[in-house]
Image (cartoon, rainbow, N blue to C red):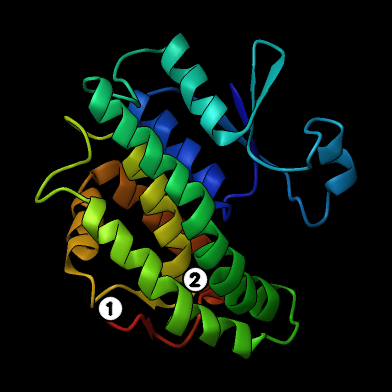
Amino acid sequence: MILHGTSISPFVRKIRLALAYKGIAYELQPLNPLTEQEVLLKRHPMGKVPILEHNHTDIIDSTVIAHYLDDVYPIPPLYPGNALQRARVRWLEEYAGTRLTSLIAGVLFYQIVLQNKILNKPCDHDAVQQCITHHLPTALTYLEQQLPEDTYVSTHLSIAEFSLWSIFRSGWMAGLRTDNYPKINQYLQQIEKEPWIKSLMDEEDHELKTFYGETTITIPAP
C-alpha cells in the first residue's frame, strides 16, 4: 500500500493517522501539488492529495479513502458507534475538511508557513488578521458547542478526531493556539496522549520545525 502526497498536507496527515490506527503498513511516497502538478493531474482530476495506491488501483479523496479503509480493514472502525454517532463523526470530518481547512490551512498555514517560510514570499497580514479576528472565533465557537465533554465524538477514536487534530496541527505550525477555547484545547490534548500520534508529532517537528511560524496566534474568546 502506497500513500502519495506531501506530509504537511492535513488531508495526508489524516490518512496517515487512519492507517496507523488500523495498524496498516504503508509507504509514504512524496508527491507535491505545488511542484508536481502535471504528474498529479494524471492520477487525480483536481490535482489534489492524498492518493492511496492499493492493489494497483488509485483511491482518491481523503474521505473516500477513509471509507475504503473501513471496507477493506473494518477493525478498528474509523466510523464507530450507532447511526447517530456515525452521523456526528461524518459531520465533524466534513466541518474539519471544509470550514476549518479554509481558515486554518487556507489562510494561516498558507500565508505564514507556505508563503512566507517555504516559498519566501510576502505574507498577507491583512488576510491573516481578518481570519483571526472575524472568522475563526465564530468557527471555533461552533466547534466548541459540538464537542463532547471529556471523551471522543463516538465510542472511541474515529476519523473525526484524526480530521480535526490534523487541521489544528497545521494551525499549530503557523502559531495558532486555542487557549480561549477550553473544550477544543482539552479535546486536542486528549488525542495527543495517544503514543503513535505523539510519534508523528516528533517526526514532523524533526523535519519541519524550521518552517514553523515564530509568533503565537491566540484567537479571541467569543
What residue is at 51 percent from the left and 78 percent from the top?
Answer: 131
Q: Nearer the viewer, residue 136 or 76?
A: 136
Q: Position of residue 180 (x, y in %)?
A: 23, 77
Amino acid on which disc 1 is placed = Pro
The crowd level at tag 1 (other Cα within 10 Å; few <14, some 14-19, many 20+) is: few
Which residue corresponds to the image point at 78% horizontal and 57% vertical from the top-left? 34
Count of picture labels: 2
For label 2, the SS is helix
Residue 213 in the image, given as x and y percentages of width and height:
50, 80
The kind of residue tagged 2 is Lys
The quarter in which the N terminus is drawn is top right
Percent x, y of residue 173: 47, 70
Name the image quarter holding the C terminus: bottom left
Q: Quadrant of residue 17?
A: top left
Percent coordinates x, y for residue 28 in the rendering: 60, 37
Query: Quick one: label 1 or label 2, which is nearer the N terminus?
Result: 2
Please name which of the two marks, 1 or 2, marks the residue nearer to the observer: 1
Q: Secondary structure at mark 1?
A: loop
Instruction: Give the quadrant of residue 19.
Output: top left
Going 49% across and 36% down the picture, which residue do you hit?
15
Specify whether residue 26 is in view. Answer: no
Q: Is residue 54 left or right of residue 42?
A: left
The span from disc 1 to disc 2 (Cα, nearest Å) is 30 Å
Could you tell me which residue is drawn at 23 percent across and 71 percent down?
181
Relative height, residue 127 to residue 52 (above, below) = below
Q: Is residue 146 left or right of residue 65?
A: left
Q: Are marks 1 and 2 in contact (CB under 8 Å)?
A: no
Residue 150's disc number? none
Please state which of residues 93 and 208 is positioned toward the viewer in this rendering: 93
Q: Which residue corresponds to mark 2?
A: 209
Provide the residue designation for mark 1: 222
Residue farthest left in this picture: 150
